[in-house]
Amino acid sequence: MNGNQLIGNSESAEGGSTFNAINPGTGETLEPAFHEATQGEIDKTLELAKEAAPFLRNASGSDRKRLLDAIAEEMEADAEAIKDRVGAETGYPQPRLDGEFGRTVMQLRVFGKVAKEGDWVGPRIDTAIPDRDPLPKPDLRRMLVPVGPVVIFGASNFPLAISVAGGDPASALAAGCPIVTKGHPSHPGSSELVARAVLRGVEKAGFPEGTFSMLQGATNETGKALVEHPDTSAVAFTGSLRGGRSLFDIAAARPNPIPVYAEMGSVNPQFVFPGKLNSDPSQFAESLFGSVTMGNGQFCTCPSMVFVPEGEDLSKMTDRYLELVGESQGAALLNPGIANAFSQGVDQWKSIEGVEVLGEGTLEGTAVGAAPVIAKVSLEDFKKNPEPFMHEVFGPSTMFVACPDADSFVEASESFDGQLGSSIHCSNDEVSSASELIGKIGEFSGRVCINSFPTGIEVCDSVHHGGPYPATTDAQHTSIGTAGISRWGRPISFQGTPDELLPDELKNGNPLGLMRLVDGKWTRDSVS
């Protein structure tokens, strides 16, 4: 590591302003210092990406798979150095480091497979009917093609899986888009080590300079310049509502607006039916606590609000939860900004009428961190002014909302806007009574979980990690799972085009063996 910008095959350190990462466990300032990207470096980076775009667009799915596999191999070669630096910059324990590293290289290989299979382009063919009355029908063929250079912002809470070589970069490269990643200022060293592995993979696979670059920056101006650049075709972001909305507005104000796929978090409400709670309130408290404190609450799917019927079972659950909070010594948070925001969020809770903070853990052994906090409010007081409860207190925080009964859950759910994930916890006997609620929370949730918590997202074909605004800026797309590749394609339709001029995906003979919608029927057969 040397703190330089990695621009294609070259390095640069033109910026006079620098910043350092901080070890949240010790408070130690970590070396080296990292340079803030200049406008000239940003221009050079996107110029290279634009030059590389035709090569990636025309590369076969097998070629893109070779690229992603090579990147995974180069990351594995540097696994220990990468994980050591991630641990120093985040305070994550070794199991978390091992798990996230494994997920990251797995995503690269999964998207390589998606690229090779090629079905993601969604080919559709309507053959001509020249003698149709009253007008002839032309031959029309549609598919997705790469949008061009993509700018990707690394996430603070996933320095590997949603960062420089995470799901967003992997899906964009699989789609045939060159990428410019911006390392997160909380873990710039981790970003640089991963970026160097990616660049070796690009060279190993024989892809051109400009396929991948990484810039560093701790100021908003760097991000703004990347989004405003005329060669940027799309943007991916995972982070706060304020940050995502700011980038979205910048992109919309361009002379040629571009899409920003921002995932911005949520409070992920949980609705607990009495039969489920009655079976073992202490066990439910332990499961909830495990979900809330996973990653010390720094997951966008953390179950921050829990709606529970009043009564003895709620008291038992609360008592056990308080015991767990009291036993906790807290853990590191990713940076001082997150720690300050958590403290301010808890203070805001305390200022809301009817809110009672029941317990706060003790923070020990870490310089920058937080301990679990549990608060409680009645449904009546919640409904008086729901808006403050919709602001995510990012960290290990839990708000219990005491409800008269389960019948009030539907009414409570009407207060919510877009959420990433929501859950219903019910016994087998209560499934039928949950039908109205599942329909209601499905109106504002990207993922509905039954008898499970939204933390621990499976990376697969059918997962959807998104949701209506303000959970994301585009509810149609997911930032996790193979369906995320569709963000980086735009539809194009060819009318009356001779077979030899069509892309392979749309040729009559179907040389790639894709599943295609031909005259209204899905088939891998050729077009006669």
Image (spheres, rainbow, N blue to C red):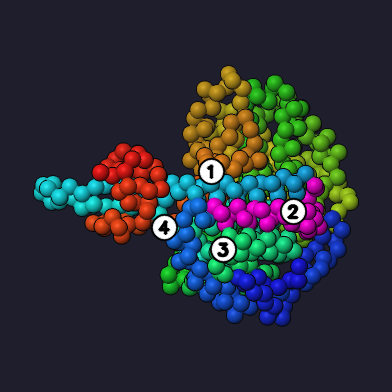
Q: Residue at image x 68%, y 60%?
A: 197
Residue 499 lies in what quarter of the image? bottom left
Segment colored magenta: 65-94
Please name the residue that numbered disc 4 is placed on: 145
Residue 74 belongs to the span the image colors magenta: yes
Viewport quadrant of the C terminus = top left
Disc 2 and disc 4: Cα gap in Å?
A: 34 Å
Disc 1 and disc 3: Cα gap in Å?
A: 33 Å
Viewport quadrant of the N terminus = bottom right
Q: Nearer the viewer, mark 4 or mark 3?
A: 3
Q: Work out whether mark 4 precedes mark 3 in sequence or the reverse, and give the earlier one.
A: 4
Disc 1 and disc 4: Cα gap in Å?
A: 22 Å
Q: Nearer the viewer, residue 116 or 480?
A: 116
Please name the residue that numbered disc 2 is placed on: 79
Callout 4 touching callout 3 (CB < 8 Å) = no
Q: Work out whether mark 1 precedes mark 2 in sequence or the reverse, and give the earlier one.
A: 2
The x and y percentages for residue 209 are 57, 69
Q: Nearer the viewer, mark 2 or mark 4?
A: 2
Q: Look at the image and tell me whether residue 188 can be seen.
A: yes
Identify the secondary structure beneath mark 1: loop
